[in-house]
Image (cartoon, rainbow, N blue to C red):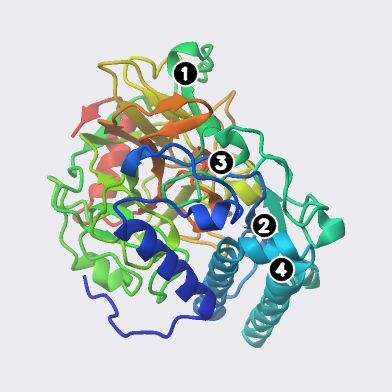
Amino acid sequence: MGRNTRQRRKPPAAKALAAAAALALGGGGLLWANFHASAHEPDQEAWGGSRTKAATARVATVSCPDVGQRLTNVPEPARQGVARELAGLDRQITEAYARLAATRDAQAKDPGFVRNAITGPLGEKRAATIDRIRITVQRAGGSFDNALEQLAPCTTRSTNRTDAGGGQQNGGQPPNGGQQQNNGGQQGGIGGQAGNGPVAADFVDITKVAPNVQGTPRRTGNASTGTFTTRCGVNANKNHNTDNVIVAPGVTNGAHHLHDYVGNQRIDAFASNRTFLRGGTSCQNRDDLSSYYWPVVRVQDGTRDFDQNADGGGKEGNVGRILTPVQAEIKYVGSPAGKVVAMPRFLRVITGDAKTTTNGLANANAHWSCTGFENKVQLTERYPICPRGSKVVRSFAFQSCWDGRNTDSANHRTHVAFADPASGVCPNGFKAIPQLTMRLVYAVPPPVIQNGQVRNAYAVDGFPEQLHKPATDHDDFISVTRNGLAGKIADCLNRGRNCA
């Protein structure tokens, strides 16, 4: 894969997280109980490696404003440098979360510990990084919004709060120094095999959810009604890494979680457009060199997978048995409002938001369901528990409007857009392109909820501070085609044909 194998010294917080993860996983899936319970808290009845522990409802995670989403005007020469600085912000949050997890006893003894030892220093580091972003942008001739400097401070969130800034009177902690009353259920704890989720409240029996699927826009007489299916496999060859070449080019472990890759086989942090064209493909159509990649799903059953001691894996709270999809359906569909134009080569698109736990749901695009229920129920903030004989389904519908000029943008969002959900019409200045849709199906052992705790939970990989929430699910795509395939896809859709 051409990965950078140079060793880098880890900061103390990262070492603490790594050491704890090694202890947890070395015990066959034991939990980070010392991180998420008081030192005097009695252990609960063991469920072995498949158990997810209830924990005291304390400060759960670090909450920092997402600087990257606010950067919309970065000159091209500055983008590489800015991307590296943004990756540095992610790394700082990861290290702060590790320190938060490793210092529960100190937090219990000192109400100001989190502010003085974690969020305060983190804010100072972020301020320095944001200033370097300003310098990089201005040196390249761009303008910088000084309001971004106000995004440096971070707070913390407790496990039973939905706001991102609670408890700010005490440096982001609850007034009692992060200790809250144990509510006797896992919903009040952080849970998870690695101590950072999911919890019982993140799951729902899909048979008890009211239908919520909305109708689709009415097609006009000029609609592009065709479909184009590309068959690229399920990543049975286990092509994985924890990079993200779109948001963190040139940065090893820029995603802080593991991805499945199908399609192009040469994608890592250091890949370039030239690399993509030489990458080979897992797709049956050899002219489809596009990269389709998504975070892996794991079952937290105590199993230790290959990355238990690796960055982006067990060291960062992504633990358990990695599931390979039993199906991965990739299909392009047309526009109900008119014809589509061909996708430009090297178009990059991210759908969903890996940081919804702290960003909110504005950019969420997660869809969880079960086979047999997809036309009735789609979930964003809950993982489904499927009935016997039914499988878990993740689905994505990417942005289908393009600005006609750019293959990427500073925040990786503003060059593409969603069509109006009622009419299917693109925003002014945008052109309709083939809409990429993906459907991933998994054979997941059903989790069991018992006494407010979840056994054999499953979860999507993510940034450690995002607590493995379902809404953080996201998908990534780089369009790379040759021999006129992009035009053939658009023509197929516009002619109303079903192609493969």
Residues at marks 2 and 3, CA–CA distance in whole angstroms? 17 Å
Horizontal and vertical percent position of residue 57: 65, 44
Residue nearest the observer in this picture, 173 or 70: 173
Residue nearest the observer in this picture, 403 or 357: 357
Dot 1 corresponds to which residue? 377
Q: Earlier in the sequence, mark 3 or mark 4?
A: 4
Dot 2 corresponds to which residue? 63
Instruction: Tell me if label 3 and label 4 are in contact, CB under 8 Å.
Output: no
- Residue at 53% over, 40% down: 54
Q: Earlier in the sequence, mark 4 or mark 2?
A: 2
Residues at marks 2 and 1, CA–CA distance in whole angstroms? 30 Å
Q: Is the N terminus in the top left, top right, bottom left or bottom right quadrant? A: bottom left
| Amino acid carrying mark 4 in the image | Thr
Q: Earlier in the sequence, mark 2 or mark 3?
A: 2
Instruction: Tell me if label 4 and label 2 are in contact, CB under 8 Å.
Output: no
Dot 4 corresponds to which residue? 119
Dot 3 corresponds to which residue? 364
Residue nearest the observer in this picture, 217 or 314: 314
Left or right for 488, reference 269: left
Q: Secondary structure at mark 2?
A: strand
Q: Which-is-in-front pick, marks 4 and 2?
A: 4
Using the rendered image of the protein, determine whether residue 99 is visible from the camera's viewpoint. Answer: yes
Residue nearest the observer in this picture, 469 or 351: 469
Residues at marks 3 and 4, CA–CA distance in whole angstroms? 26 Å
